[in-house]
Image: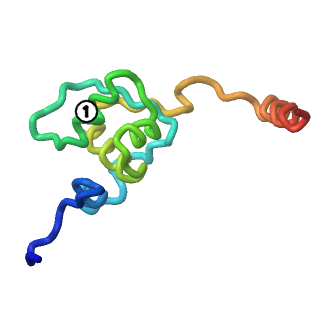
């Protein structure tokens, strides 16, 4: 057995800890991105971007939620939020918060829906 660290596992493939993708950062700059916020690529990928950033831009060619980006990349949401913050800071994505998507239903309507579901 060699003294060099094993970076590949035959069963799991390449192994990189998620915090290595964010260089140890746990929060991005700016406001926290809601899970249902919509992300859309607005800029062209740059050569200096890492593969995860490029994959996000590819996935966001059409509007996609933050949660769906995490699923698409198979990464924890916290890591995806940091990576999205990087892209937002560089002007490569636009983020639409859920409140900007339109008016929310009233509390009365939501209670009626819940009561209707309970009645089923």
Residue at horizontal 17 percent and vertical 62 percent from the top: 7
**Number of on-image labels:** 1
42 to the left or right of 71: left
Q: Give the answer, above or below, for where 114 lies relative to 27.
A: above
The quadrant of the picture occupied by the N terminus is: bottom left
Taking the view exactly as shown, the residue that stands out farthest to the right is: 119
Residue at horizontal 33 percent and vertical 49 percent from the top: 82
- For label 1, the crowd category at 10 Å Cα-Cα, with few meaning under 14, some 14 to 19 and many 20 or more, is few
50 and 81: which is toward the camera: 50
- Per the image, label 1 sits on a secondary structure element best described as loop
Residue at horizontal 8 percent and vertical 76 percent from the top: 2
Question: Residue 81, position in %: x, y?
Answer: 38, 47
115 to the left or right of 12: right
**Residue labelled with disc 1:** 91
Q: Picture quarter containing residue 44? A: top left
Question: Residue 36, position in %: x, y?
Answer: 51, 36
Question: Residue 110, position in %: x, y?
Answer: 78, 33
In this picture the colour scheme is: rainbow
The quadrant of the picture occupied by the C terminus is: top right
Question: Residue 49, position in %: x, y?
Answer: 16, 40
68 to the left or right of 49: right
Q: Picture quarter containing residue 21? A: bottom left
Q: Give the answer, above or below, for where 55 lies relative to 3.
A: above
33 and 64: which is toward the camera: 64
Q: Picture quarter containing residue 109? A: top right
Residue at horizontal 41 percent and vertical 24 percent from the top: 63
């Amino acid at each position: 057995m060699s003294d060099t660290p094993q970076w590949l596992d035959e069963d799991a493939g390449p192994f990189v800890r998620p915090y290595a993708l964010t260089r140890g950062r746990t929060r991005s700059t700016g406001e926290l991105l809601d899970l249902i916020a919509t992300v859309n690529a607005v800029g062209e990928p740059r050569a200096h971007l890492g593969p995860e950033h490029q994959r996000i831009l590819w996935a966001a060619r059409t509007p996609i939620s933050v949660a769906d980006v995490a699923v698409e990349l198979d990464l924890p949401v916290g890591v995806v939020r940091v990576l999205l913050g990087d892209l937002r800071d560089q002007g490569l994505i636009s983020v639409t918060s859920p409140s900007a998507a339109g008016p929310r239903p009233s509390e009365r309507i939501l209670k009626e829906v819940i009561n209707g579901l309970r009645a089923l």
